Image (cartoon, helix red, strand yellow):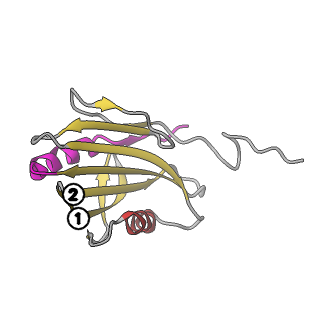
Amino acid sequence: MPVLAYPGPAAPPLPAVTLEVPEGWEALPAGSGLLRARGTGSAGDPIEVGVAAHGVAEGTAAQGLVEEVTDAGAPEGSEVEPAFVVEIGGREWAARNLTWDEPSGPVVEVVLATSSGDDASARFVVATGRVRGQGLEDDYDTLQSVLETLTVGTDA
């Protein structure tokens, strides 16, 4: 009987992932993700960031994954911007922003995806950040500065 193992040839480990957050932010249990944190925005609304690993079909590109994730998670009535590419931590990330309104005010979510390595394992690191409420513009700047600290190592 074949034995499957993690890490192993069919499921290599992810490289190290780091994210720097401002003083006062709290690290939260990541659940099925890799990292999760929350801070308080300028008007008291939460700023949230999560980082997860995604396995996808071989041949999937980061842009395709970020589009799939945002299309699947976008609430009804969302405005979804076209995907674009940014460089963070010396690597390319596909990115996409979506916005929607909730009873408590507007929400902006940023989704980023990058390949976890140079192999053809079709494994990606996906980061999601969300701001909401009255201080949204200032809080978006804070969220962006946090996401710009993302690093994905090249060694497992």
Q: Are marks 2 and 1 in contact (CB under 8 Å)?
A: yes
Which of 137 and 43 lies nearest the eye of the viewer? 43
Label 2 neighbour load within 10 Å: few <14, some 14-19, many 20+? some
Q: Which mark is residue 69?
A: none
**Whole-percent x, y for residue 135 in the image:** 10, 48
Q: Which residue is mark 2?
A: 107
- Mark 2–mark 1 Cα distance, whole angstroms, equals 5 Å
Give, as a single range, the part of the protein colored magenta: 133-156
Instruction: Tell me: residue 51, above or below residue 63.
Output: above
The amino acid type of the residue labelled 1 equals Trp
Q: Residue furthest front?
A: 103
**Whole-percent x, y for residue 62 in the image:** 44, 62
**Whole-percent x, y for residue 148 in the image:** 26, 45
Say whether residue 129 is left or right of residue 133.
Answer: right
Tell me the SS state at disc 2. strand
Q: Which residue is mark 1?
A: 100
The amino acid type of the residue labelled 2 equals Val
Tell me the SS state at disc 1. strand
Label 1 neighbour load within 10 Å: few <14, some 14-19, many 20+? some
Image point (9%, 51%), residue name: 134
